[in-house]
Amino acid sequence: MNYQFPIKTLNQLRPVLIGFRKIKGFTQKDVSERLAVTQQTYARLEANPASASIDRLYKVFSILGVEITLSSISPSPFISHTEMRGAFDSTPARREKW
């Protein structure tokens, strides 16, 4: 079955992540073993996925068989590389140390 869940706020990540894990029939321990981390480490990620890096989330979603798709909700003017880089550097995920 194909599920689609548009994520419009970071608060939506947690229930979507948990939902996909449960649909797959995995426990936190199952996912943590596939990530080669402790169950406690994965539980922290699942409790606050908005603070995780996109790389870490990509690995989790790959384990869960979830494809990440990005789309624009409206046409927007081009953003310069400098503006995009500045916005990225100030995110919690960029400062994350795993």
Image: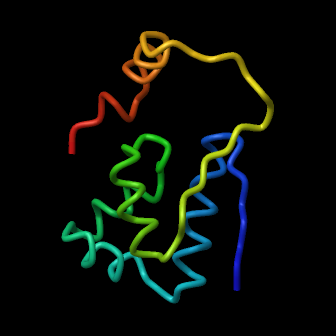
**For residue 43, above or below residue 86:** below
Please provide percent x and percent y for residue 85: 40, 18
Instruction: Tell which of 87 and 22 is nearer to you.
Output: 87
Residue lying at the far front in this picture: please name it: 78
The residue shown at (56%, 81%) is: 22
Q: Please identify the quadrant where the N terminus is shown.
A: bottom right
Instruction: Tell which of 42 and 66 is nearer to you.
Output: 66
Instruction: Give residue 40's quadrant in the image.
Output: bottom left
**Left or right, residue 72 beside residue 69:** right
Please provide percent x and percent y for residue 45: 39, 55
**Left or right, residue 43 beside residue 21:** left
Please provide percent x and percent y for residue 86: 42, 13
Residue lying at the far right in this picture: please name it: 74
**For residue 67, above or below residue 74:** below
**For residue 73, above or below residue 43:** above
**Left or right, residue 50 beside residue 76:** left
**Left or right, residue 5 beside residue 93:** right
Please provide percent x and percent y for residue 65: 49, 76
What is the image's colouring? rainbow
The residue shown at (51%, 12%) is: 80
Instruction: Give residue 44's quadrant in the image.
Output: bottom left
The residue shown at (55%, 64%) is: 17
Q: How many marks?
A: 0
Q: Please identify the quadrant where the C terminus is shown.
A: top left
